[in-house]
Image (spheres, coloured by chain):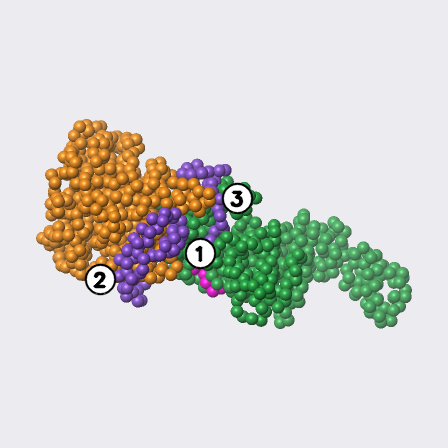
Chain colours: A green, B orange, C purple
Amino acid sequence: MTTAESTPDSTALDTTWEIVIGLEVHCELATATKLFCGCANRFGSEANTQVCPVCLGLPGSLPVLNRRAVELAIRIGRSLHCEIRPSTFHRKNYFYPDMPKDYQVSQYDKPINVDGYLELPSGKRIGVERAHIEEDTGKTTHIGGGGRINDADHSLVDYNRAGVPLVEIVSRPDLRGAEEARAYVSELRAILVASGASDGRMEEGSLRVDANISVRPAGTTAFGTRCEVKNLNSLRSLGRAIDHEAERQIALLEGGGRVVQETRHWNEGEGRTSSMRSKEEAYDYRYFSEPDLVPLEPDEAFIAEATAGMALMPAARRRRLSALISGDGDAPLPTSAVEQVATLVDLGLDDLVVAAVGLGADSRLALARGANEAAQSAEEARHLDAAVFAELLGLEATGKLSSTQSKTVLAELLERGGEPEEIARRLGFEALSEDDLGVVLDSVIAANPAEWERYVGGEDKVAQLLTGQVMKATKGRANGKAVAAALAERRG
Amino acid sequence: MSGPTSQGTASDPSSMPETAIEIAARVRAGEVSARSVVEATFARIGAHEAEIHAFTTLTGEQALAAADEVDRKVAAGEDPGPLAGVPIALKDNLCTRGVTTTCSSKILEHWVPPYDATVVRRLARAGAIAVGKTNLDEFAMGSSTESSAFGPTRNPWDLTKVPGGSSGGSAAAVAAGFVPLALGSDTGGSIRQPAALCGVVGVKPTYGVVSRYGLIAFASSLDQIGPFATTVSDAAALLESIGGHDARDSTSLAVAAPRCSEVLGDGVEGLRVGVIGDFLNDASPDCSSAVRAAAEVLAAAGAKVDDVSIPELLHGLSAYYLIAPAEASSNLARYDGVRYGLRVDGPDVETMNARTRAAGFGPEVKRRIMLGTYVLSAGYYDAYYAQAQRVRTLVARAFARAYGQFDVLLAPTTPSVAFDLGAKTSDPLEMYLADLFTIPSNLAGHPAMTVPFALGEGGLPVGVQIFAPALGEREMFRAGVVVEAGADPAASGPVPMGSVDTGAAGGVR
Amino acid sequence: MPEDLSAETVAHVARLARLELTPEESETYASQLSAILEHVEAVRKLDTTGVPETSHALDLRNVLRPDDLATSLTPEDVLSGAPAVEDGRFLVPRILGEAP
């Protein structure tokens, strides 16, 4: 089913249509050097300063495969539950100024990773058809005509990026709607960063997304004609492009027309896709086996070494934390808790919570303080000592600090460090003693005689009001549970 | 330390130079200076290059500087290398830093590589002295050097004949006595065929034994760099200097250079030699009788010689003319006028590309690019390219069966002696047939060498080809040196160029 | 036996190969290529059932290099052969379309 909430300016989509999406994500690998040569794999350098005969494709040059790129490609395959297979390289032949050899070395019918899946936070599995190795192209800048390719006067080419290692991850068309597509890219990015394969910087082009979008009447199984929208480089663009393209196709079909299979360009400024100057038929790349490279057959030992020490993947982290929260119970976590778990994992704070619970902290409390408060200063929270966090949580759990006080101490810990008890003392947050509490209780009872009578008479609800009065009088220093206990005791 | 040398002086350029091994020994011993060797070399070149046109570029200054460095090392007691002071010519598809590398094509006419091919660096380490770049068929596509954009090379034995191709310039440079050594490249016979037509030794090593880094690619799965020399032992020495694993070439075998010099005295006692009968039928009488005679030489030396039939090898030609152009069409795509080489302007980049390539490539290159693009294209890939790769397997298997019974095989190198300039240029297919006997080794990745053996029709040299299985260079050279010993000395270059006037060579015609 | 390559086919192949041909060249190549293809017909007819393709003569596998930095060319060397340069980059005339 479709949703349109992500884009305020789009019209509500007809709920009888289903948007079907497959995504191709190009991930730049976080290697030190390029795929086939020792030039630096680094973003943002001055033009043509990271180029050699190999990546410039000079006559006579030859490629030699980067071991680390293969290791990272294997890590990606493992983290997407792919089968890791013997593979070969092929040449994809076409002319374009950013292509030094006018062919791209890629993998065609024998890619390294096949038949995997990605698990969304919602639990839905999206099929991953393949994740193969290929080389990146140079970068063209169009001069004149507002920088758009069609109106340019000429173009300039920088080959620093040519030869940077890529893994292209191709999903099956299992995604439904823009939200799910965004969730897929978000989760994939987290996986790629967790596996060490990528730095995840979409703004630097580390991750580039092409979307294959089609629509069909909900409930049918045949696929509609799809269009490809290339080079979507932010989650926002991805969502907007999908919604607009789906609208376009639906309008076409509802008007009796048909969707033409083509590649379309997303115009961020205008907020729409437009047809590129390309033929309806597929380009003939004349793939053939790359004679300058030999086949790749990583054995068990190679794969084991490549994946050794790989961090836990986000899905596994969510499972780990959820299990901790739900304890021995079988009942699924409430939605709010599920969201909190996802937030913590997303921000890299799950380790903190898991460790704190391991040191005895209450899991629900740790979850709450972690996801609600610590998450506000995620960068600092990632450096927070789990033992310190556990200590603070203990103070709150035993009533020595109120929830309000606990949050304040936490903020102080994150900003300036220190120790929970010391901070509490400094801020005057020592818990009210029993005697002090009794004195306040006396004055509140005296000030609210009617309400006290009703409470003593059995109206438990009044306790809330009385508690509120006590909190007000103590300026939040009283611990809610302690007050409730004191009231109950006083009543007898 | 210079002085008169037996390799001739500027005033007598017709006297024949020594072998590379002899030159190196004398330079290393300080008996003769590298500088004087180089000076004499350029004198010889200067006297006859106009007739031959073996070179596209001469590197006089760099050669003298390199010679001086060799002499300095000798004087200082440092090791100047096994080929110290030996002048060598390099086919102009080998990248030489700072020296134009043109592939005899207009599209690279002024291109100066910023790097050296691995073999060029290894030669420098060995003390050899590159004196120039030699002419070739454009982008190594051809069998006569006539498709060079800068004019053909002439056969030193008879200036009206082709030297063969594509490494015609290198073959001629050695055959004319300009240099004792040259490097060429062999994709379907481009070292062996011109070597045979020019009466010199030519070797294609096992695929992967010599690094291709810096060799401008024609057909990557077939190309190999190899030596030209006047003697088998010189060829062995050159191969030793350039061969062996190179980390810059992924298709380079993890082996050291084959040490063939040390087996040259081993003889061929008990060596099993198979004469490929199928080829003899397709060769001219002089070429096939040379093979029979060479077989007898080997038998007399103790080899066990027998006939063998390997008809599958004859399919190699067709498979080659599908595979090689296909790979070439991809390898030559990079010549698009964007980064280097010729550019012919256009209103947009696509037009610029197309016009540049139209102006920069000659007809043979265009023909092969078109053919290669076609056989790879959708709908034709399986019937043509994939089928050719399957036939390639058949050829390899046929060889493997033969090597179950034999150690080396004997065959003609070429179907005939050198043909007239212009005789085959109007029919591409006719030209392609020149490679019939050389192509199978490239398809299988096996080594093969040609040894000048006899004079054939018109007094032109005939070479005999020896095949060996992969990494069988040592057996191949053992047989080669015995064949050489039994050859007609008149059939072997260098040709005394001093006696060459308009059309005669070395008392031949 | 394949027919002569049609003019459309030759034009299509020339486009793929980015070669601008004159009408005479197109005609010449059509007949020359047809002749060559006819000659290699014999190969097409060979029985190769069950025979694998050879894409590499050698039996090498897993040739890898360590992820170590090497010296790149200077920008001067990179641009040394460039027909046109602007702003340290290779200049090309306007590009008509996106990459295929």
| A290 is within the stretch colored magenta | no
Q: Is residue A386 left or right of residue B84?
A: right
Q: Say which quarter of the image contains residue B446.
A: bottom left
Task: Identify residue type, mark 2.
Answer: Arg
Judged from the image, the secondary structure of the residue bearing numbered disc 1 is loop
For the C terminus of chain A, give its image quadrant. bottom right
Boundaries of the magenta span: A111-118
Chain for numbered disc 2: B
Q: Is residue C44 left or right of residue A395?
A: left
* Residue situated in front as seen by the camera: A431 or A35: A35
Residue located 47% across and 64% down the image: A115
Residue located 75% across and 58% down the image: A402
Judged from the image, the secondary structure of the residue bearing numbered disc 2 is helix
Q: Earlier in the sequence, mark 1 or mark 3?
A: 3
Residue located 14% across and 38% down the image: B504
Q: Which residue is mark 2?
A: B401
Residue A407 percent coordinates (x, y): 71, 55
Q: Which residue is mark 1?
A: A283
Report the disc number at residue A152. Answer: 3
- The residue mark sitting in front, 2 or 3, is 3
For the N terminus of chain A, give its image quadrant. bottom right
Where B35 sits versus A209, above or below?
above
Determine the main secondary structure of the stretch shown in magenta.
strand
Judged from the image, the secondary structure of the residue bearing numbered disc 3 is loop
Decide: few, some or many residues near mark 2? Use Cα within 10 Å; few <14, some 14-19, many ≥20.
Answer: few
- The residue mark sitting in front, 2 or 1, is 1
